[in-house]
Image: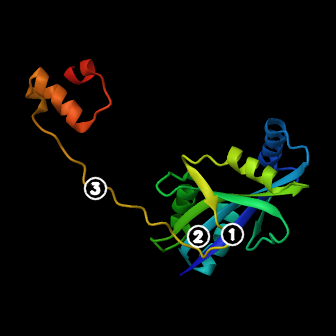
Amino acid sequence: MNNYRIYVEKRAGFEVEAKSLLGDFKENLQIDTLQNLRLLNVYDIFNINSEDLSKAKDSIFAEPATDEVYDEIDLQEKKYFAVEFLPGQFDQRADSAVQCLGLISESNDTAVKSGKLIILEGELGEEELRRIKEYYINPIETREKDLESPLALDKVDVPHEVPFYKGFINYTVEETLAFKKELGLAMSEKDILF
């Protein structure tokens, strides 16, 4: 079992999302030097054998009629950035891929992380690139992905056991309000008393 990274890009004529994003950047950021944009889905696939990956490339990760699949992308001399979900954020694309991989693979521990690679074409300086990144990357749910670092699966912290509170329904008004204050509950007094 090995780890792999693949890139999937819509073929010419099918790149609707890339064209929409290009228009968005040009209109909302007023960057006229941006001439074109390539958008690729990035999949980091963990604990999969090469045979299963070969089957999955054109049946799970891409549609042969509309997509190109690459094992590597030459990013030399290009302006680009990649984005991935923060650890703990739900990644629907990756979750769907894992479920589909379960149908074609006997391995139960295959994992997938997805992201997007955006390659910008045109006479762009560092300031324009910074503005585009700030506009596109939502720090609440995503972060910039380092394509140079080795493939690694994020370790998600296991949450502490959820506490149970019993008997508070029998509290007096004063005890209930003290309970609300002690736990820092974000509800009104009327709500907790109800």
Instruction: Tell me the SS state at disc 3.
Output: loop
Q: Position of residue 12 (x, y in %)?
A: 88, 54
Q: Which amino acid does label 1 sit on?
A: Ile
Q: Quadrant of residue 56?
A: bottom right
Q: Which amino acid does label 2 sit on?
A: Ile
In this figure, which residue is indicated by the disc labeled 2? 45
In this figure, which residue is indicated by the disc labeled 1? 6
Q: Position of residue 58 (x, y in %)?
A: 71, 65
In the image, farthest residue toward the front: 127
Q: Where is residue 30 in the image (x, y as percent from the top left)?
A: 85, 39
Residue drawn at the location 24% of the way across and 54% of the way down? 161
In this figure, which residue is indicated by the disc labeled 3? 160
CB-based contact (under 8 Å), mark 1 and mark 3: no
Residue drawn at the location 51% of the way across and 69% of the way down? 153
Residue drawn at the location 72% of the way across and 59% of the way down? 81
Instruction: Tell me the SS state at disc 2.
Output: strand
